[in-house]
Image: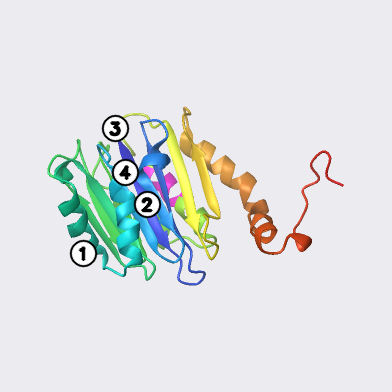
Amino acid sequence: MTFSVAGFCPETGMLGCAITSSSISVASRCAWVRSGTGVALTQNVTNPDLGSLGLDLLQQGLAPAAILARQAEADSDVEWRQLGVLNARGETATFSGARALGIHATAEGKHCLAMGNLLANTEVPQAMISAFENSEGHLAERLVQALEAGLAAGGEMGPVHSAGLLVAAEPKWPVVDLRVDWHQAPIGELRNLWFLYEPQLQAYVTRASDPSNAESFGVPGDE
C-alpha cells in the first residue's frame, strides 16, 4: 500500500524521506527521521513502534543491518513488515517480510534506499534510486523528484491518497515536515507544498536561533 524513498546529503548532513500510500495519513505512521541520527521507515501492515525503535538504535550507533535484526526480535509479526534504515553516514539496509503484500521490492543506492509493496512492478524502487542519485539541489527536492519517478515508473497497483516529506538538518526538529493526508493526487500536492515552503524554510530556522534577524512575511498585524 506504500512506496517510499530515504536519502542522505553528505554536503549538508541532511537526512530525510518521502513516502506515499493508498492509505490515509501515511507519514504519521511510517516515516521517522531524527537530526544527526538517521531515517527509519516501517510500512506494509505497519507497526509504528519499529520506527521509533529504529531511530533509538541508530542513535546508539548500531549498523543498519543490525538494527533490522533487533527490530525483528522486537516484533513477532515482523514477516508482515517492510523496513528500511538509513544512518547519518549514508549506510542502508532494507527488509521485506514473507507476508509483504502484492508485488513488493526494495533497492539501495549511494546514500539512499527505496521500497514499496502492492506495486505495479518490481522496478519502482530502482526508479526512485536512479532519480535520487542523478538529482542535485536541496535534499527535499531530490526526495520529491525520486517519489515522482516512482509514480512515473508505475507506482502502486491502485491510486495513492496520502504523501509526506520529512527532512532533518542541524536543528533538533525537522526543518521540513510536509504532509498530504488525503488527496486525489497527493504527490502533485506535495510538490506544490514544497514549492510554497522552500523559499520560507531558512527564515523559520533563523526565527528559532536568531529571532531579531529573522525575515518577516508581512502577515496582518505584523508591523
Tell me: 174 left or right of 154: right
Residue beneath disc 3: 157
| Quadrant where the N terminus is found in the figure | top left
Q: Is residue 189 visible?
A: yes
Sequence-first tag of 1 and 3: 1
Q: Which mark is residue 66?
A: 1
Report the residue marked by disc 2. Answer: 5
Predominant SS along the magenta part:
helix
Span colored in magenta:
144-150
Using the numbered discs, state the Cα–Cα distance from disc 2 to disc 3 in whole angstroms. Answer: 18 Å
Indicate whether 79 appears above or below 111: above
Mark found first going from the N terminus, 3 or 4: 4
The image shows residue 127 at horizontal and vertical percentages of 34, 51
Dot 1 falls on a residue whose secondary structure is helix
The amino acid beneath tag 2 is: Val
For mark 3, does the 10 Å Cα neighbourhood hold few (<14), some (14 to 19), or many (20 or more) residues? Answer: some
Q: Which mark is residue 48?
A: 4
Provide residue 6's location: percent of width, then percent of height.
Answer: 38, 55
Residue 119 at x, y = what percent?
A: 27, 38
Image quadrant in which you'd find residue 94: bottom left
